[in-house]
Amino acid sequence: MTIDLKQARDRLNALKAETALLSEKSQLARKAVQLDQQSVGRLSRMDAMQQQAMAQAQERARSAILVRIDQAFRLIEQNEYGYCLGCGDEIAIKRLEIDPTATHCVSCKGG
Ligand SMILES: [Zn+2]
């Protein structure tokens, strides 16, 4: 195993912080949209609703990322980080550098 676990942890922590920050910003944006909705006409209200739906989808994606980050931390603790959950092979380091929450190798690609 050639994976630098400290580096992996750093990457995961950075990703987590970044995701939390985005989530916070988007919460403020969502509140702003709600305020807008009370004061604007029908057309922009539809715009606002669309924006809100998009923001909610992004928020769901972010919670999914947070779940994956926690899973990655668990795998690190269990000394199983960097191994494919599908076939047990090592996951390519390049792949983990791009997505530190990857749990499957390229050929299994579960996530
Ligand atoms: Zn695999």
Image: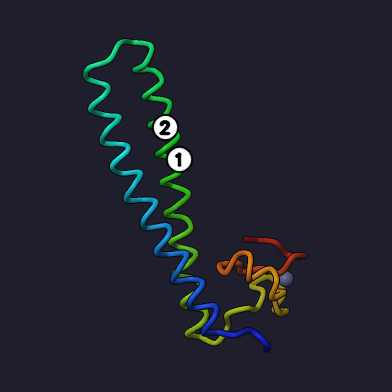
Q: Which mark is residue 19?
A: none
Q: Which mark is residue 53?
A: 2
Specify the quadrant that holds the N terminus.
Answer: bottom right
Residue 9 falls left or right of residue 90: left
Q: Where's residue 107, x and y in %? A: 77, 65
Above or below for 11 versus 48: below
Q: Where's residue 96, x and y in %? A: 63, 71
Residue 17 falls left or right of residue 104: left
Marks 1 and 2: in contact by CB < 8 Å? yes
Distance (Cα) linking label 2 and label 1: 6 Å
Query: Who's the residue at 47% across and 67% down the image?
Result: 69
> Which amino acid type is marked by label 2?
Ala
Occupied quadrant, residue 110: bottom right
Residue 83 falls left or right of residue 27: right
Occupied quadrant, residue 32: top left
Q: Where's residue 40, x and y in %? A: 27, 15
> Between 2 and 106, which is closer to the camera in this rendering?
2
Occupied quadrant, residue 37: top left
Query: Who's the residue at 68% across and 70% down the image?
Result: 86
Q: Secondary structure at mark 2?
A: helix
Instruction: Determine the residue located farthest toward the top in the rendered image.
Output: 42
> Which amino acid type is marked by label 1?
Ala
Residue, disc 1: 57
